[in-house]
Image: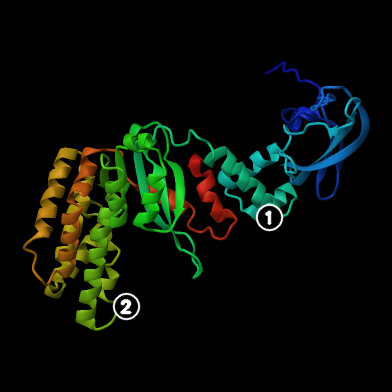
Amino acid sequence: MLNATFDAPCLTTFCRLDELGLEAIGQRLDPDRAVLSCRVVQADDWCRACGCQGVPRDTVTRRLAHAPFGHRPTTLLVRLRRYRCTGCGRIWRQDTTRAAEPRAKISRTGLRWALDALVLDHLTVSRVAAGLGVAWHTANTAVLAEGRRRLLDDPARFDGVAVLGVDEHVWRHTRHGDRYVTVIIDLTPIRDGTGPARLLDMVEGRSKQAFQHWLASRSQAWRDRVEVVAMDGFSGFKTATTEELPEAVAVMDPFHVVRLAGNALDSCRRRIQQQIHGHRGRKGDPLYAARRTLHTGAAFLTPGQQQRLDALFADERHLAVEVTWGIYQRMVAAYREPDRAVARTLMTTLIETVSSGVPAALREVITLGRTLKQRADDVLAYFDRPGTSNGPTEAICESGSGWSGTGRSGWMSVVSNRV
């Protein structure tokens, strides 16, 4: 704009104090922080008990941590006028609930900044506390309570859920306490193409009971609206879904199905490695050198990788690995097939192939076939219901894989509705 006009600078507006019902009346820059002197805009001089008008008695100051500006933490010194009722003699001070919760040490604007810093900017609680200029426990307690109030206590956050994703996650890398949590995700936006997945809840433990108890705590009307539950191969999730959501369709998502085949391929490679060489894979061993190439899709093999596999499979001692690799590649090809009807046929044929008549020497394929036969309906259900992959559940789990302790680790269940 060539002829832009600007209003006179207003510290109240710039620091967003008007949202808190405050007005800036002074400022001071200390070496380690910025200090703003404020007053409450509304007089609030009427007695809440008898309705009589009060008279000014004295003034007190409330100290609040505010959203930082620049590299300095910002502190609000809020001057509060106290009144004495002319009728009943009651004494009260001006209301500051717009600015902060009673007895809180952080303003509402400061709490919003802390939530954004923690969730969007991935700052640690220590860094958030330093930005606010408060102790670690003060920041963690206040922001955790605000996150629960805004997200977990929101009665509408379970509305519209039709597709669930459930998975377990290693949460605590210590010997104390339960190491696992059950993660429940709303995949409805993914299926409908309306947005990202939403974290609904995290439940301590990895068991049928943990997931079943969570489902049972929801209303019957809510459970009746759930159409699909995407999960891994853990039978506990399957049983809990069958008992609590009898009308919902269980879907074993591609990530975990392919991982079953990949694990079978790795187990076969290690077994043959031990049979031939008598030790684990070492540098220079053909099977060990090809361990990553074996997991590459056949359509994406480079000429060098293809030559390495040809040389590997030319050795008859590696026949079991070659057969297992072929099963793995057929499974990958089925999921990559764009025509879902054709893909379903390919997967059905594969399950029938590995479910019976497999030579005893292919013990890993036999185990894989047994699992696929037991969960055949869940595996094939994926091809009838696009958009029910459990991938977003895995992504949300992995986004917090490095968190531990009561600080940031407690946050995944509170703030990941924005994921």
Res 309 seen here: yes
**Residue depicted at 53% across the width and 58% down the height:** 403
Nearer-the-camera pick, 387 or 286? 387
Nearer-the-camera pick, 102 or 190? 102
**Residue depicted at 34% across the width and 36% down the height:** 162
The kind of residue on which mark 2 rests is Arg
Which label was assigned to residue 282? 2
Name, please, the residue furthest toward the bottom.
278
Would residue 81 be found to the left or right of residue 296 on screen?
Answer: right
Nearer-the-camera pick, 353 or 237? 237
First of labels 2, 1 by sequence position: 1
Residue 392 spot, x, y in % from top left: 39, 45
Residue 101 sits in which quadrant?
top right
Nearer-the-camera pick, 219 or 103? 219
Local secondary structure at mark 2: loop
Q: How many marks?
A: 2
The kind of residue on which mark 1 rests is His
Name, please, the residue furthest toward the left.
357
Would residue 108 be found to the left or right of residue 391 on screen?
Answer: right
Residue 54 spot, x, y in % from top left: 89, 25
Residue designated by label 1: 137
Would residue 10 be found to the left or right of residue 140 on screen?
Answer: right
Local secondary structure at mark 1: helix
**Residue depicted at 78% across the width and 20% down the height:** 7
